[in-house]
């Protein structure tokens, strides 16, 4: 009996002593102190010791783009930290070039506040704000791409430049793909997806480029193209994309938490000929840019090269064909990499970079004098960069949006 | 004392003679700097937990240890593992706080492997060997620090070899973990050569 009692007393005493030691150490090492954060010479605000800079800025309505949600993988939440250099975290070494690190660039999600900091941000980012919007319309464009039209507050619309993106946040959710309403014509494509499930226990945020034309914006509408992020074919057990699944599930009238507009992908202020190359939902920012430029009157020649697999994957094609008829300076070319016999395809066959080389770069008198805008899957971007390099186009004439895959 | 120290570092090397703590050994040995950081963390954790556990064992748990409060007949040695693990867990947590405060880059580089030191068999093994071999508290300090140094030495050397091997022309199937296992085996073979050093 004494043995049992002594054992219990001993265990409790040991656990209490260890906990007390830890509590004391924690009080010493992680003090609950206020820390001043200064952004671009504005009045500093107070945050708590130990929080990450991305979150601290967000609570003061400075919403940096962070498609990965603070995991350090998207490299978008860049800030310049003034004053004493902070040693870069492993994630920052991977995302920032040596020159950027030397200038004091950091990823806000990787910085823990341990003392007063001064950071520099582009002023445009300070205009980005969080807002709630309503889904006005949602429709399937192809079996895996859905167009969602949102209404946004006027001050957000006023800040939108063609090429910008917004971040949408999906609340915690869980549903099976059998609950997604799919139009009859895509039912076959969806048969094998029905077994998938989307689930998340925490809100998740992802970025989507704005595809709105000036006319859409004038009516206060944000048009977004959502591609359903499916597990890669070689790893079918991974879950589908949390936000894209949820956006395929939301019905018209639903409320969505958003922030933005963000991004510096936009048409250059130049009179050079514009060549836009896109694939998949990379269509979105390019559509915005094309409509904006054509609406300005007397634009330079513009050509739009779009790559898809087959005719079913094409969308907005009628719209661009109409534009091309109305505007002689606009040229619209489509390359299908894998047309089906039933498609009766007579245009370019093969990948879009090959069509660009054959149909544009080879005969163009001065390919290095054009501006190139790329948005699409990483493989497409890499291939197009290859043919542009071959044609002698310097890299400062090439602009691309690397998240729109 | 010297024998204990030499045995701890070389002949009884926890990683290469007993194959303890091999999961972390293989996982955190891609870069020398990270491996060295983890090695130092292990030295500190081992250097503190083994002596503390030695004291707890000598004055609280061992048969007859409680005679100082007049209970000589009580034997609490069956509580050994749970108490040792508690001490190790608290120590690792403290280590995590310290690194997060003073060396955040190393803290991020170690990632989940830092808290995993809690269940690193090399650490618990160090304390259990100490009991099995009946070291007194002073010897326990030497054994604790020595075995930590031994493990740190092994993982740092291993990381150095792996850094070089990255540029080696190895058959496709052996790149990565396959080669790592072979290197571990060869290093263990090498360490067995220290066998006659300590009687």
Image: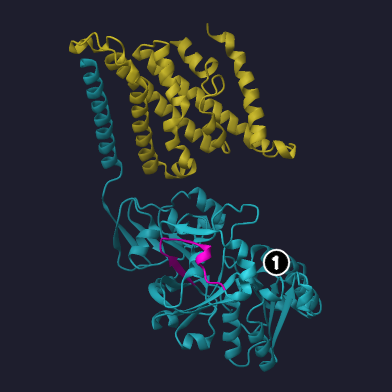
Chain colours: A cyan, B yellow
Give the tally of numbered discs. 1
Name above or below for residue B66 compared with residue A121. above
Answer left or right for A106 relative to B159: left
Q: Which residue is mark 1?
A: A385
Residue drawn where x is 74% and y is 73% of the image: A336
Q: Quadrant of residue A83?
A: bottom left
The extreme left residue here reads: B70
Answer left or right for A389 relative to B85: right
What is the crowding at mark 1: few (fewer than 14 residues within 10 Å), some, or many (at least 20)? Answer: some
B39 falls in the magenta region: no
Name above or below for residue A1 compared with residue A118. above
- Secondary element under disc 1, as helix, strand or loop, is helix
Give percent across and percent down for residue A146. Answer: 56, 73
Residue drawn where x is 27% and y is 30% of the image: A15
Residue B119 in sight from this viewpoint: yes
Give percent across and percent down for residue A27. Answer: 26, 42
The magenta stretch is A166-182
Q: Quadrant of residue A394?
A: bottom right
Q: Quadrant of residue A387?
A: bottom right
Answer left or right for A110 relative to A363: left
A173 falls in the magenta region: yes
The extreme top residue here reads: B199
Q: Nearer the viewer, residue A7 or A185?
A: A185
Residue drawn where x is 68% and y is 75% of the image: A312
Give percent across and percent down for residue A92. Answer: 51, 53
Task: Identify the chain of the residue marked 1, using the numbered disc in the image.
Answer: A
């Amino acid at each position: 009996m004494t043995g049992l009692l002594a054992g219990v007393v001993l265990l409790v005493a040991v656990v209490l002593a260890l906990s007390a030691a830890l509590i004391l150490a924690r009080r010493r090492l992680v003090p609950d102190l206020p820390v001043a954060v200064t952004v671009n010479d504005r009045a500093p605000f107070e945050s708590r010791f130990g929080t990450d800079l991305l979150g601290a800025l967000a609570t003061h309505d400075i919403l940096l783009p962070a498609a990965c949600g603070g995991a350090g993988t998207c490299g978008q939440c860049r800030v310049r930290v003034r004053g004493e250099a902070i040693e870069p975290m492993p994630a920052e070494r991977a995302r920032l070039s040596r020159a950027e690190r030397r200038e004091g660039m950091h990823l806000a999600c990787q910085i823990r506040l341990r003392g007063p900091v001064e950071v520099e941000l582009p002023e445009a980012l300070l205009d980005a704000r969080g807002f709630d919007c309503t889904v006005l319309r949602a429709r399937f464009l192809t079996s895996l791409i859905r167009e969602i039209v949102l209404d946004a507050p006027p001050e957000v619309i006023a800040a939108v430049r063609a090429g910008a993106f917004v971040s949408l946040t999906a609340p915690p959710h869980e549903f099976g793909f059998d609950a997604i309403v799919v139009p009859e014509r895509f039912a076959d494509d969806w048969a094998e997806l029905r077994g998938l499930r989307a689930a998340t226990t925490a809100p998740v945020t992802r970025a989507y480029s704005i595809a709105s034309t000036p006319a859409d914006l004038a009516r206060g509408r944000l048009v977004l193209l959502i591609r359903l992020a499916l597990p890669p074919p070689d790893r079918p057990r991974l879950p589908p994309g949390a936000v894209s699944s949820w956006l395929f599930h939301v019905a018209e009238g639903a409320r969505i938490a958003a922030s933005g507009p963000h991004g510096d992908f936009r048409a250059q202020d130049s009179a050079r000929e514009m060549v836009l190359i896109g694939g998949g939902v990379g269509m979105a920012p390019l559509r915005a840019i094309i409509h904006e430029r054509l609406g300005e009157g007397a634009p330079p020649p513009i050509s739009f090269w779009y790559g898809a697999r087959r005719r079913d994957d094409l969308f907005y094609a009628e719209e661009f064909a109409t534009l091309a008829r109305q505007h002689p300076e606009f040229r619209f070319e489509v390359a299908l990499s894998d047309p089906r016999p039933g498609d009766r395809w007579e245009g370019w066959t093969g990948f879009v970079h090959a069509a660009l080389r054959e149909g544009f770069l080879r005969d163009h008198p001065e390919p290095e004098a054009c501006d190139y805008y790329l948005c699409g899957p990483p493989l497409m971007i890499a291939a197009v960069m290859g043919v542009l390099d071959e044609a002698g186009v310097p890299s400062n004439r090439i602009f691309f949006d690397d998240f729109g895959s | 004392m010297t024998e204990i120290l030499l045995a701890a570092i070389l002949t009884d090397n926890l990683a290469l003679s007993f194959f303890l703590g091999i999961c972390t050994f293989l996982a955190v040995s891609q870069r020398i700097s990270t491996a060295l950081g983890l090695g130092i963390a292990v030295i500190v954790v081992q250097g503190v937990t083994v002596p503390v556990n030695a004291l707890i064992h000598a004055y609280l748990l061992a048969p007859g240890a409680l005679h100082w409060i007049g209970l000589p007949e009580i034997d609490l040695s069956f509580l050994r593992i749970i108490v040792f693990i508690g001490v190790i867990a608290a120590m690792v947590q403290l280590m995590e706080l310290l690194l997060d405060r003073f060396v955040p880059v190393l803290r991020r580089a170690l990632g989940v492997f830092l808290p995993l030191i809690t269940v690193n068999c090399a650490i618990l093994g160090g304390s259990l060997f100490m009991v099995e071999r009946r070291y007194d508290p002073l010897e326990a300090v030497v054994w604790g620090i020595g075995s930590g140094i031994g493990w740190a030495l092994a993982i740092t050397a291993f990381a150095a070899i792996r850094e070089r091997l990255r540029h080696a022309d190895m058959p496709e199937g052996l790149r990565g973990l396959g080669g790592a296992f072979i290197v571990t085996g060869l290093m263990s073979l090498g360490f067995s050569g220290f066998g006659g050093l300590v009687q």
